[in-house]
Image (cartoon, rainbow, N blue to C red):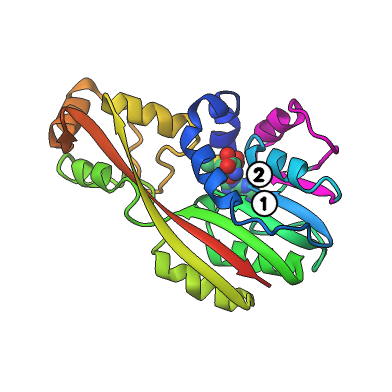
Amino acid sequence: MAHAFGCAAAEYDDLAALQRQIGDRLLTGLPARSLPGWMMDLGAGTGWCSRHLDRRYPDRPLLVLDIAAGMLRQVQSRSFRNLPGLLVGDMEALPLASGCAGLVVSNLALQWCVDPAGAMAEMARVLQPGGRLLLTTFVSGTLEELRQAWSEVDDYTHVNEFLDVHRLDEYLAAAGFHHWEVSVHTMSLAYDSLLGLFRELKGIGAHNVTEHRPRHLMGKGRLRSLEKSYPKVSGRINASFVVAYVTAIR
Ligand SMILES: C[S@@+](CC[C@H](N)C(=O)[O-])C[C@H]1O[C@@H](n2cnc3c(N)ncnc32)[C@H](O)[C@@H]1O
């Protein structure tokens, strides 16, 4: 996983319009004033949300964490008002003291965690009482058209499994959050070809990382079969991205 994202790092920003749009929407939920303690951007990628936090709350220290060192190298090359702390680390096992953060932001990283409940518990642990979490994740229904089209071609798992949105309530409660809201927003994006969709998924490190993925390359014949079974609207390929937006108070 870290390797896939590390490889995608250099191209990430050119291909991450969707992430940016979702991140911007998430950040509209930021509190009016800064909260005591550290601000953290977990699974920060190239630091789109980090830069926003840096500008918005210049009085607070910022920690930018990602599992892929390549992503953090991109963060390092951007300008910040205040130098952020950079940490290569796993959000499922944060190497950080309990209760040190006032604000945790995580845009589209939770869906790549092996143990999303554990990651949520870690976010609750590092937040101080009254601290805020703002998080987005892709949930089930994402890339459903692609999953269905593949199921007509072969029996492999080609599309990552996404969380059932109802699990988020369980995870938030178990982690010890007091109040939270989960809202779901579906985006449908159109591509000229399947290759266009695959390029986007690969560029953002989100190509198939499931255990039962096929180990061979996709030949032209299989691509043609897939293209045939993929539903089209006015000749274009639509892909659904179902996003859960979470705001929670510790
Ligand atoms: C789709 S990108 C989103 C990046 C960024 N938050 C944004 O809005 O552009 C997901 C990021 O999560 C990171 N990631 C995946 N699993 C992680 C984990 N267990 N711990 C920390 N970062 C992780 C990846 O390396 C990648 O940079």
- Secondary element under disc 1, as helix, strand or loop, is loop
Can residue 87 be seen?
no
Q: Position of residue 48 (x, y in %)?
A: 64, 37
Left-right relation of 74 to 21: right
Residue drawn at (49%, 33%) of the image: 17
In the rendered image, residue 23, in percent from the top left (x then y), is placed at 56, 45
**Residue 213 in which image quadrant:** top left
Q: Which residue is mark 2?
A: 67
221 sits to left or right of 95 = left
Rendered view: 234 above or below 240: above
- Counting from the top left corner in percent of width and height, residue 146 is at 26, 41
Quarter of the figure with the C terminus: bottom right
Residue drawn at the location 26% of the way across and 46% of the way down: 147
User: What's the amino acid at mark 2?
Assistant: Ile
Label 2 within 8 A of ligand 1 by Cβ: yes
Counting other residues with Cα less than 10 Å from the Cα at mark 2, is it few (<14), some (14-19), or many (20 or more)? many
Q: Quadrant of ligand 1?
A: top right
How packed mark 1 is, by other alpha carbons closer than 10 Å (few <14, some 14-19, many 20 or more), is some
Residue 158 vs residue 80, the one in the foreground: 80
The residue that appears at 61% across and 58% down in the rendered structure is 134
Residue 90: give its label.
1
The amino acid pointed to by label 1 is Asp
Task: For mark 2, give the secondary structure.
Answer: loop
Q: Is residue 27 above or below residue 216?
A: below
Q: Residue at x 64, y 77 (%)?
A: 176
Sequence order check, earlier mark of 2 and 1: 2
Which residue appears farthest toward the front when viewing the image?
32
Q: Quadrant of residue 240?
A: top left
Find the magenta span and give its range: 60-85
Can you say whether 76 is above or below 162 in the image?
above
Q: Is residue 171 visible?
A: yes
Q: Is mark 1 within 8 Å of ligand 1?
A: yes
